[in-house]
Image: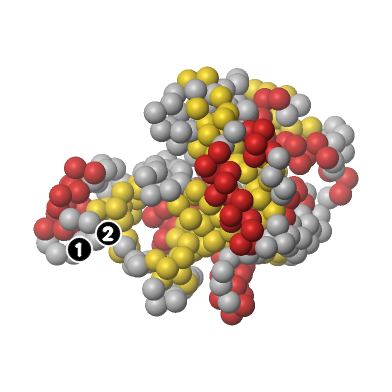
């Protein structure tokens, strides 16, 4: 399929947030024309794509018309009109990942059933249709505290997730089809990004360790390579490879994992697209996650995932108490620090905890990179 990488090839990307922006930048290296569909005409990808289409990616007609404009479709999010994609696929449009895979993954309940069916370790779970059914199960002793509630669809960046520790937390219980899973004691949270092309070639990026913001459940810092032994690293890679193989998926898959207090590695969630936990690869790995996605969906040889240099990444989140036109405080000071690479997404309006950019700190020493990341966290603020 090498003949697809031509100056006239039109790659459609559904959604134009920061992932769409960085994917468009990677595509421009190969002179691939990118078309972005997004409801926000000021979305981050607008300045990087070749053609912007304003529209709702949940609307059948909008997605269908968009598909008729391009030679292939890929995504930066899961919450898309699946029926339109299925119709486009039936008419011969190449869509990666496949709409059926997207449909499975966007439903956290179906994700869990997939793990169970393929004997992939994950936290014990139950599925419920609504809040009332959950409360009834608690009263009957079929669900016990503490547990984690996740809405089956629509959640992202920590939204649609609640930890219910006791009856006092009932006010936080969400209504809607939900996944209830046992709250496991977590020692570490890891992520591995794995890629697969149509030939069946698979490459895993090194595992990263994630630290979360306790208030908003957003990744606040990630460390690559993760502080795990070789045996655990191999186990993580094998689990990620098994999932993408069993899905028969072409594209890029982010696999989030927990290391429990008993040193068991279990799957948390997966995402069929570039992922926040892979942004550091732009500077620290021979092939970035964005280039690897392009290699996978064009059925090219997958790039090397060898680590060039250790890295720490922190998300730039909108500061609490600020909302309005964005301003960055401490930018010049942070740029003067060796190894600090700042990525601003171009979002014009900041809100508390909104992802506004990320910073990757590269160094031969993880300890040095962590120290520098703390300096950046203190100095670089997103305000209005």
Residue located at (45% from left, 43% from top): 156
Residue furthest bottom in the image = 231
Q: In the structure shown, which secondary structural element does the residue marked by tag 1 occupy? A: loop
Quick check: 37 left or right of 324? Answer: right
Q: In the structure shown, which secondary structural element does the residue marked by tag 2 occupy? A: strand
Looking at the picture, tell me which residue is in the foreground, 262 or 326.
326
User: Given contact means CB atoms under 8 Å apart, are the residues at marks 1 and 2 in contact?
Assistant: yes
The location of residue 161, given as percent across then percent down, is: 35, 48
Q: Which residue was labeled with disc 2?
A: 147
Residue 357 versus residue 246 in the image, above or below = above
Residue 136 versus residue 357 in the image, above or below = below
Q: Quadrant of residue 174?
A: top left
Tag shown at residue 144: 1
The location of residue 159, given as percent across then percent down, is: 39, 42
- Residue 317 seen from this side: yes
The location of residue 347, given as percent across then percent down, is: 58, 27
């Amino acid at each position: 399929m090498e003949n697809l990488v031509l100056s006239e090839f039109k790659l459609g990307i559904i959604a134009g947030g920061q992932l769409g922006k960085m994917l468009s930048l990677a595509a421009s290296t190969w002179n691939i024309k990118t078309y972005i569909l997004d409801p926000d005409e000021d979305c981050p990808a607008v300045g990087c794509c070749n053609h912007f289409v304003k529209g709702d990616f949940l609307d059948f007609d909008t997605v269908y018309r968009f598909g008729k404009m391009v030679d292939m479709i890929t995504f930066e999010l899961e919450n898309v009109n699946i029926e339109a994609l299925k119709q486009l696929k039936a008419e011969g449009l190449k869509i990666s990942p496949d709409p059926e895979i997207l449909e499975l993954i966007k439903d956290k309940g179906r994700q869990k059933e997939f793990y169970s069916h393929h004997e992939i370790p994950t936290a014990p779970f139950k599925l419920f249709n609504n809040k009332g059914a959950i409360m009834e199960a608690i009263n009957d002793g079929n669900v016990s505290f503490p547990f984690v509630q996740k809405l089956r669809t629509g959640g992202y960046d920590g939204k649609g997730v609640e930890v219910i520790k006791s009856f006092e937390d009932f006010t936080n219980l969400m209504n809607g089809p939900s996944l209830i899973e046992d709250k496991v004691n977590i020692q570490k949270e890891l992520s591995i990004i794995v890629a697969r092309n149509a030939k069946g070639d698979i490459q895993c990026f090194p595992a990263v360790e994630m630290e979360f913001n306790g208030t908003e459940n957003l990744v606040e810092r990630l460390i690559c390579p993760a502080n795990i032994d070789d045996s655990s690293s191999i186990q993580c890679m094998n689990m990620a490879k098994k999932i993408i193989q069993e899905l028969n998926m072409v594209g890029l898959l982010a696999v989030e994992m927990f290391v429990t207090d008993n040193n068991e590695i279990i799957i948390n969630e997966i995402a069929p697209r570039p992922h926040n936990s892979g942004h550091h690869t732009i500077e620290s790995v021979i092939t970035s996650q964005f280039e690897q996605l392009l290699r996978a969906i064009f059925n090219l040889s997958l790039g090397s995932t060898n680590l060039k240099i250790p890295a720490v990444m922190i998300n730039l989140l909108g500061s609490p108490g600020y909302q309005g036109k964005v301003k960055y405080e401490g930018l010049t000071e942070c740029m003067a620090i060796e190894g600090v690479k700042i990525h601003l997404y171009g979002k014009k309006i900041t809100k508390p905890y909104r992802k506004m950019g990320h910073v990757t700190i590269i160094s031969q020493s993880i300890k040095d990179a962590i120290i520098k990341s703390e300096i950046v966290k203190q100095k670089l603020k997103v305000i209005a």
